[in-house]
Image (cartoon, helix red, strand yellow):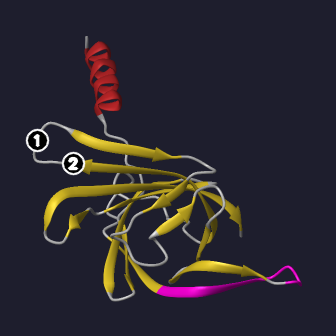
């Protein structure tokens, strides 16, 4: 009887334990290509307006500032290292790349493997906040924190950016 009780307690202990998982380390460093952008406008009603931009499409947002105001999806690139995000590349004759727009960013709020935190940087006088949705080996998915399209009123706009790593 004692052995059955011991086996039963051992099995219950093993299957009832919660597996501990370390928070994943972000691997944001690299060059990325904008592969897909989803635009979602949410009203205070039950309706929503959404659009998806695929490679070959031109995403234009007149409420944004450069470099996020127009993006040639599938062609436009950005680069990140451990503290600087870069836009607007110029390909040099020797094969190197010169990035003309550079902004220092910080990563906040990475508390668990389910919450990867967010990136925050100052871009042309406005603070940008991008939630890190997914950080894969060859991909990165970011979502804006939302913005008001018409000043401080109107519909809330959320933009999700799907990026593919193209370089180190």
Left or right? Give the position of 16 relative to 35. Answer: left
Residues packed near mark 2 inside 10 Å, few (<14), some (14 to 19) or many (20 plus): some
Q: Secondary structure at mark 1?
A: loop
Tell me the quadrant of the picture where the C terminus can be found. bottom right
Tell me the quadrant of the picture where the N terminus can be found. top left
Q: CA distance from mark 1 to mark 2?
A: 8 Å
Looking at the image, is 18 positioned above or below residue 85?
above
Instruction: Pinpoint residue 97: horizontal percent, then vertical percent.
Output: 75, 81
Instruction: Pinpoint residue 141: horizontal percent, then vertical percent.
Output: 47, 55
Query: In the rendered picture of this protein, how many numbered marks are placed on residues?
Result: 2
Left or right? Give the position of 14 relative to 67. Answer: left
Work out whether residue 81 can be spotted.
Answer: no
Please give the name of the residue rendered at 47% of the width and 58% of the height, measured from the top-left corner.
24
Does the magenta segment cover residue 99?
Answer: yes
> Observer-nearest residue: 29 or 17?
29
- Residue 42 is labelled as 2
Residue range of the region highlighted in magenta in the rendering: 93-103
User: Residue 78 appears in which quarter of the rendering?
Assistant: bottom right
Does the magenta segment cover residue 37?
Answer: no
> Observer-nearest residue: 157 or 32?
157
Instruction: Pinpoint residue 100: horizontal percent, then vertical percent.
Output: 61, 88
Q: Residue furthest top?
A: 1
Residue denoted by label 1: 45
Looking at the image, is 30 positioned above or below residue 121?
above
User: Residue 160 appears in which quarter of the rendering?
Assistant: bottom left
Please give the name of the residue rendered at 18% of the width and 72% of the height, measured from the top-left corner.
151
Instruction: Pinpoint residue 106: horizontal percent, then vertical percent.
Output: 40, 80
The majority secondary structure of the magenta stretch comes to strand
């Amino acid at each position: 009887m004692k052995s059955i009780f011991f086996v039963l307690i051992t099995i219950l202990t093993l299957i009832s334990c919660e597996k501990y998982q370390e928070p994943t380390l972000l691997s944001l460093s690299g060059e990325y290509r904008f592969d897909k952008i989803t635009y979602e406008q949410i009203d205070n009603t039950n309706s929503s307006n959404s659009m998806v931009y695929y490679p070959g499409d031109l995403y234009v947002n007149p409420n944004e500032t450069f470099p996020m105001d127009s993006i040639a999806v599938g062609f436009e690139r950005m680069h990140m290292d451990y503290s600087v995000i870069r836009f607007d590349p110029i390909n040099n004759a020797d094969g190197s790349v010169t990035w003309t727009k550079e902004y220092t960013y910080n990563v906040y709020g990475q508390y668990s493997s389910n919450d990867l935190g967010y990136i925050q940087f100052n871009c042309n006088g406005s603070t940008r906040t991008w939630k890190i949705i997914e950080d894969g080996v060859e991909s990165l998915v970011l979502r804006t924190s939302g913005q008001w399209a018409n000043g401080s009123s109107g519909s809330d706009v959320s933009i999700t950016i799907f990026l593919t790593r193209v370089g180190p």
